Image (cartoon, grey):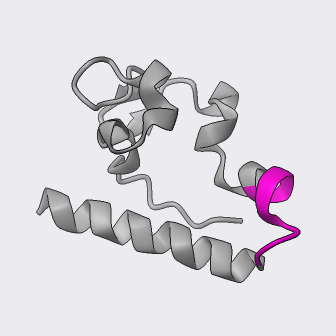
């Protein structure tokens, strides 16, 4: 399982990817984010589900360890940008 620390950085930077336009409230922040937590976490879109995306789209082309590393690298970059 992907180890998310619930910082909310990914949810505050939706404008970095066109994939998340439907979730953007207009300022790059997810319309379902409250504080650092998702209001619809149990029903969140597939794009927000790291583990499910791996199983559906990436498991045949990359190891889960490498996939998690790539996700953590992006997470770190987003956190660094907010500092």
Pick whichever, 37 or 64, lies toward us.
64
Left or right, 68 with reference to 83 = right
Q: Residue, x 36% and y 38% (percent of image)?
A: 14
Q: Residue, x 11% and y 63% (percent of image)?
A: 83
Q: Does the magenta stretch include residue 56?
A: yes
Residue 65 vs 2, above or below: the answer is below
x then y, percent, for residue 79: 26, 63
x then y, percent, for residue 44: 62, 30
User: Which quarter shows the N terminus?
Assistant: bottom right
x then y, percent, for residue 5: 45, 61
Left or right, 79 with reference to 56 = left
Q: Do we see residue 40 in this rendering?
A: yes
The image quadrant that residue 24 belongs to is: top left
Residue extent of the magenta highlight: 54-62
Q: Residue, x 41% and y 66% (percent of image)?
A: 74
The image quadrant that residue 75 belongs to is: bottom left
Pick whichever, 50 or 40, lies toward us.
50
């Amino acid at each position: 399982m992907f180890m998310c620390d619930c910082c909310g950085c990914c949810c505050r930077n939706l404008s970095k990817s066109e994939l998340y336009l439907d979730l953007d409230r207009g300022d790059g922040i997810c319309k379902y984010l409250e504080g650092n937590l998702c209001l619809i976490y149990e029903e969140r879109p597939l794009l927000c589900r790291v583990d499910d995306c791996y199983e559906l789209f990436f498991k045949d082309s990359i190891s889960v360890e490498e996939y998690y590393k790539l996700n953590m690298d992006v997470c770190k970059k987003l956190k660094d940008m907010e500092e």
